[in-house]
Amino acid sequence: MAFDFGILQPYVNDAMITDIDSNGRTVYTTHVQKGKSRAALLEPGYLEQLLNRLCNAGAINDQFNYEHPKLDGEIDGLRIHATHQSFSTSGFTLSIRKNPVELVITQKTAKKTKYCSSAVFDFLQACVAARMSVIFGGEVGTGKTQLMKTMLSMCDEQASIVLLSDIDEMRMLELYPHRNFRQYIVNDVMSYTAATSCILRDNADYVCFQEVRDEAVDDLFLVLSSSARVTATLHLKDALLMPQRMIQLSSNKNDHHLLSTIHDYIQVCIAPCRVMKNGRLRRFIGQIALFWNDADRVPQKCLLYEQREEQAIHYAMPDYFKKYFANQNIQLNWREGIENL
């Protein structure tokens, strides 16, 4: 039986709402089209009672008290994060993010919402066919995870794909129960490094880091030393700065070869964006950047795609990538120019 969120239940049921947040006094919701707004006021003590019910009902198997002031978990496809009043001076807080099983971004919805040009979907499929490593970079709430989920859905049904995260936000095993997906959940017992050691024995085709932060960057580099390719989400503002952002997070900042190593093994960074215009929230692919090393081992990068307002700008495909796709018999009809979406 699904957990009853009481006053918050209508927002949980509303398919157009993606996030529900509360500072203990006020409830805020994020609407797919309208963005964030204040939704309701809570009676004093209500949020504390709700969080206690979550724990007491066994809905989230975790302690939540003065000694354990942070609560993280997943229930009924909802990602839960809460803080205790002993940790937060503003009182109890709660954040709920919905994790739908179905694909949110498809070629059909992308065309309808002007999310990207049709050529971008062809390019993404070509990246998967060529077994490229792809990073999805952007700010919070831009839809990085959902776009990565769409890419993984394009993989061959027989491909061995390992998912690594602190919570099952993508729900790929539910979406594709008959495919070769494996899920590792990192926690206080199983660290990213320990999980990565297991993954290296799994002979995976793709290893998906749901979010790269801190020590997980070095574990991602370790996976790249095997035959596996990686895909991951990363917080950044400019797709072209992906390598510098990863170096910033790495413990091997002084490795002078790290930049060229990244350009060797991570070829693509896709940066989704979101903007509020005329009271409506729009999400779209803002940039696609490519990375490689030239014949002299000098790192190179360029923008392949950029979207401004409702104009899609397709830049020239570098010769390096034309040869990369051609060597694997992958035909990609990418044309330089500007397209009105």
Image (tube, grey):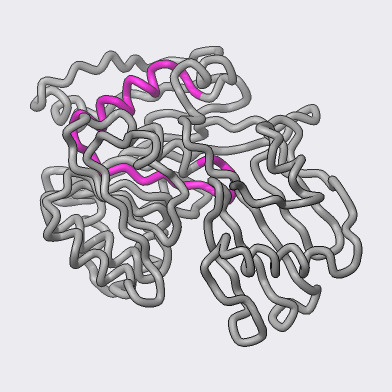
Q: Up-down: is 26 above or below 145?
A: below
Foreground of the two, 46 or 172: 46
Foreground of the two, 131 or 309: 131
Is residue 90 found inside the magenta-colored segment of the image? no
Q: Residue at x 40, y 67 (%)?
A: 249
Quadrant of the image occupied by residue 173: top left
Q: Residue furthest bottom?
A: 67
In the picture, measured across the screen, residue 135 lies left or right of residue 99, that is left
In the picture, measured across the screen, residue 185 lies left or right of residue 324, that is right
Percent position (x, y) of residue 169? 47, 49
In the picture, measured across the screen, residue 278 lies left or right of residue 52, that is right
In the picture, measured across the screen, residue 290 lies left or right of residue 34, that is left
Which residues lie in the magenta part? 116-143
Q: Is residue 284 visible?
A: yes
Quadrant of the image occupied by residue 81: bottom right
Q: Is residue 291 visible?
A: no
Q: Residue at x 32, y 24 (%)?
A: 123
Q: Residue at x 35, y 65 (%)?
A: 216
Q: Residue at x 71, y 35 (%)?
A: 14
Percent position (x, y) of residue 31? 72, 37
Percent position (x, y) of residue 200? 15, 60
